[in-house]
Amino acid sequence: MIKIMSLMDVVGLVTKNMVPPNTMLVSIRDTSGGFTSLYEYLDSKEEVFRKIIVSQMDDIMTSGVDIEGKMGPTDNSVADILLKAGISGDVIVHCTGGISRSSAIAYLIACRRTGKPTEAIKILNPKIHWPNDTIVKIGAKIFGDEEIKHTYDRWRERIMVEGEMMIKFEDSESNG
């Protein structure tokens, strides 16, 4: 099982003692230092998880440090997570909102575990997730598999088209 969550959802799961046994946590944190007390809480509960992998990267679409001093995903940070996440076992991947960085990393973990991007993409919920494009590109490069990026691009394009169709449908209903 690979689960994508927000920081608040993970904290809630831990607080309610609802973390499945032997679950690994991939904790993707902003470099700004926000939410310190929540991260300290999670870190103090290390006995709840089989392993906690912490990575700091901001949700930006460039690799490395940008002009505002934010740290985007790098080849090393993504490779480190993928190596430590392994090829089996339950894992919860979270970032602040559970939308972009965590969904990209979860997709890559699923690609590694299934070997099939078309299967891995099924862990994404198009109503919630919008994976960080740079992380997906880095993962495809790490695995040497462009199908990872192509599958993701097709998924994203389909979501955008379906979203536009829904907006047009809703507009036509309201104007009808």
Image (spheres, rainbow, N blue to C red):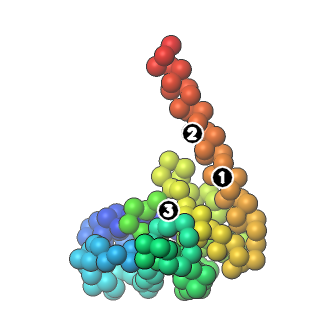
Q: Which comes before the other along the chain, label 3 or label 2?
A: 3
Q: Amino acid at mark 2?
A: Gly
Q: Position of residue 95 (x, y in %)?
A: 42, 69
Q: Residue 69, located in which quarter of the rendered image? A: bottom left
Mark 1 touching mark 3, by CB under 8 A?
no
List the residue tagged with mark 2.
163
Residue 26 in the image: above or below residue 116: below
Q: Position of residue 136 (x, y in %)?
A: 62, 68
Q: Residue at x 75, y 77 (%)?
A: 144
Q: Which mark is residue 68?
A: none
Label 1 element class: helix
Q: Which mark is residue 155?
A: 1
User: How far is the residue under mark 1 from the one under mark 3?
Assistant: 14 Å
Q: Which comes before the other along the chain, label 1 or label 3?
A: 3
Residue 163 in the figure: left or right of residue 143: left
How many residues crowd mark 3 within 10 Å: few (<14), some (14–19), many (20+)? Answer: many
Q: Residue 164, located in which quarter of the rendered image? A: top right
User: How far is the residue under mark 3 from the one under mark 2?
Assistant: 18 Å
